[in-house]
Image (cartoon, rainbow, N blue to C red):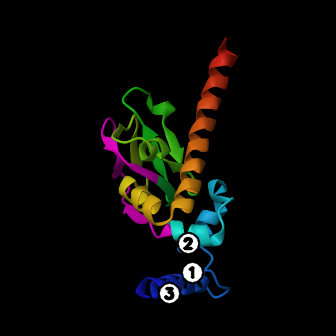
């Protein structure tokens, strides 16, 4: 009975957070996620379930989010600010900046004990939403349908990146 009561509370919380009275900005995480293309196939209820496993992290300008060659276990969505991807193997001109509604770390979330090839730092004060490996494990246990949909989405993103790399390699030959 207690679980049903909590479930009803969560449902009420969801409807209130997504009602006409709720702010429609990045502080309303389900609304923010719905704006990002990778979540286009998620229902509002699925997004509400997913955000229960997301952590909001605030980083100061220059603060490292992910260290190069260290284990990383998170998928990050940029809510505000700017982050920069760099590596000891690339020049300053090759650094990549990511902005709100962009994301990184799908490989780190999907592979256990994955070392990051990149150093990722907040370029300015930034807010990120993070889903870490233990959170994904909990999501799999408690909301398996949402977890499968999320993992499938991340897998598709990874495959699209591989396809893009293959196209670039083939265009050089």
Q: Find disc 2 in the rendering and name its residue.
A: 48
Q: Find disc 3 in the rendering and name its residue.
A: 9
Q: How many marks?
A: 3
Residue 127 makes an appearance in the image: no
Of the two numbered discs 3 and 1 on the same chain, state the one appearing first in sequence: 3
Of the two numbered discs 2 and 3 on the same chain, state the one appearing first in sequence: 3
Bounds of the magenta span?
Answer: 51-75
Position of 170 relative to 163 (above/below):
above
Give the structural element (helix, strand or loop) at label 3.
helix
Which residue is most to the top? 173
User: Residue drawn at (56%, 61%), measured in percent from left and top?
Assistant: 146
User: Residue drawn at (59%, 64%), measured in percent from left and top?
Assistant: 33
Q: Residues within 10 Å of mark 3 (few under 14, many from 20)?
A: few
Position of 48 relative to 95 (above/below):
below
Residue situated in front as seen by the camera: 165 or 147: 147
How far separated are the C-alphas under marks 2 and 3?
12 Å
User: Residue drawn at (56%, 57%), measured in percent from left and top?
Assistant: 100
The image quarter containing residue 35 is: bottom right
Of the two numbered discs 1 and 2 on the same chain, state the one appearing first in sequence: 1
The image quarter containing residue 138 is: bottom left
Q: Find disc 1 in the rendering and name its residue.
A: 14
Give the structural element (helix, strand or loop) at label 2.
helix
Residue 123 is situated, as x and y percent measured from the top left of the image, at 43, 51
Tell me, yes or no, whether the two marked residues, 2 and 3, touch with CB atoms within 8 Å: no
Residue situated in front as seen by the camera: 117 or 50: 50
Tell me, yes or no, whether the two marked residues, 1 and 2, touch with CB atoms within 8 Å: yes
How far separated are the C-alphas under marks 3 and 1?
9 Å
Residue 8 is situated, as x and y percent measured from the top left of the image, at 53, 86
Q: Residues within 10 Å of mark 2 (few under 14, many from 20)?
A: many
Q: Quadrant of the C terminus?
A: top right
């Amino acid at each position: 009975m207690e679980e049903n009561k909590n479930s009803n509370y969560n449902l009420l919380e969801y409807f209130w957070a997504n009602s006409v009275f709720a702010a429609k900005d990045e502080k309303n995480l389900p609304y923010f996620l719905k704006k990002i293309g990778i979540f286009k196939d998620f229902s509002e209820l699925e997004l509400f379930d997913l955000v229960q496993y997301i952590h909001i992290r605030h980083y100061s300008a220059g603060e490292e989010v992910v260290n190069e060659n260290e284990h990383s276990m998170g998928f990050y969505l940029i809510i505000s600010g700017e982050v920069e991807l760099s590596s000891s193997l690339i020049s300053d001109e090759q650094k990549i900046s990511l902005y709100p509604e962009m994301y990184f770390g799908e490989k780190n979330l999907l592979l256990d004990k994955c070392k990051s090839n990149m150093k990722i730092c907040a370029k300015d004060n930034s807010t990120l939403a993070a889903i870490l490996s233990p959170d994904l494990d909990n999501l799999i246990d408690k909301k398996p349908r949402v977890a499968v949909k999320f993992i499938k989405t991340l897998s598709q993103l990874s495959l699209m990146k591989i396809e893009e790399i293959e196209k670039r390699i083939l265009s050089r030959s």
